[in-house]
Image: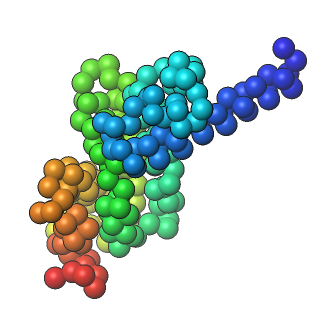
Amino acid sequence: MPYGDAMATRTRSEERRAEIVRAALDVIAERGYRGASLAAVAERVGLTQQGLLHHFPTKEALLVAVLKERDQWDAVPDSRWRADLLASLVEYNAMRPGIIQTFSALLGESVTEGHPAREFFTERYGAVRASMASVLRAEYGERLPGGLTPERAAPLLVAVMDGLQYQWLLDPESVDMPAAFRDFLALLGEDPGPDGA
């Protein structure tokens, strides 16, 4: 196959994969994690389920691609993040329960040995902890008000964000995720904002 034809084929394949990921995001948003079947996504893009499996061999592989796409949306360079913007991210997450449900379900499953999403989450959490340490350093310098370094506080910040997501998914009527996160920022010494107590 000539080089130009190979490049065109690769580009078409990449475009098709991107189309499938966008369709999966839509299906998840509409139907939630459990309702997001490969058949529903395949139908959305005009493929058979077998045709979809050519691009993503398992549902988990497709869902990891969806999560990577989600992270691209959420990614802001460290130099632009501030702690108050994290509260905006939490509010944004509260508007997309299907994606948060997918993230949480895959995260829970990924702790098992050999799970296809394990490497994604391991790498992601390393990057997120480093990013959160940068946010905390920009806000507080080398020590937070309680005396912790940004590196020691970063895993706690990530744990609060993810832990609130689980509680909110289980009982959204009782857990106001954005308000609870603003309360946490207030504990760190941040202004909780106009909706804070």
| 192 left or right, relative to 124 | left
Pick whichever, 33 or 5, lies toward us. 33
For this orientation, the residue located farthest to the bottom is 194
Q: Give coordinates of residue 3: x percent, y percent.
A: 85, 21
Q: Is residue 76 above or below residue 14?
A: below
Is residue 166 visible from the viewing direction of this image? Answer: yes
Determine the residue positioned at 28% across, 85% down.
194
Indicate how the structure is coloured in the image: rainbow
Residue 125 in sight here: no
Toward the top, the furthest residue is 1
Residue 124, x across and y down, in percent: 39, 41
Point 49% across, 67% down: residue:
80
Q: Quadrant of the C terminus?
A: bottom left
Name the spot of residue 188 as percent of width and height, x first.
21, 71
> Looking at the image, which residue is at 34% across and 37% down?
35
Tell me: residue 33, above or below residue 154: above
In this orientation, which residue lies closer to the viewer: 149 or 172?
A: 172
Task: Out of 169 and 113, give the one closest to the viewer.
Answer: 169
183 left or right, relative to 74? left
Task: Give the camera-side residue of 193 and 37.
Answer: 37
Quarter of the picture containing the N terminus is: top right
Residue 138 lies, with reference to residue 58, above or below; the image says below
54 sits left or right of 67 in the view = right
User: Residue at 67% across / 29% down in the picture?
Assistant: 13
> Residue 145: image x %, image y %?
20, 72
Say which quarter of the image contains residue 10.
Answer: top right
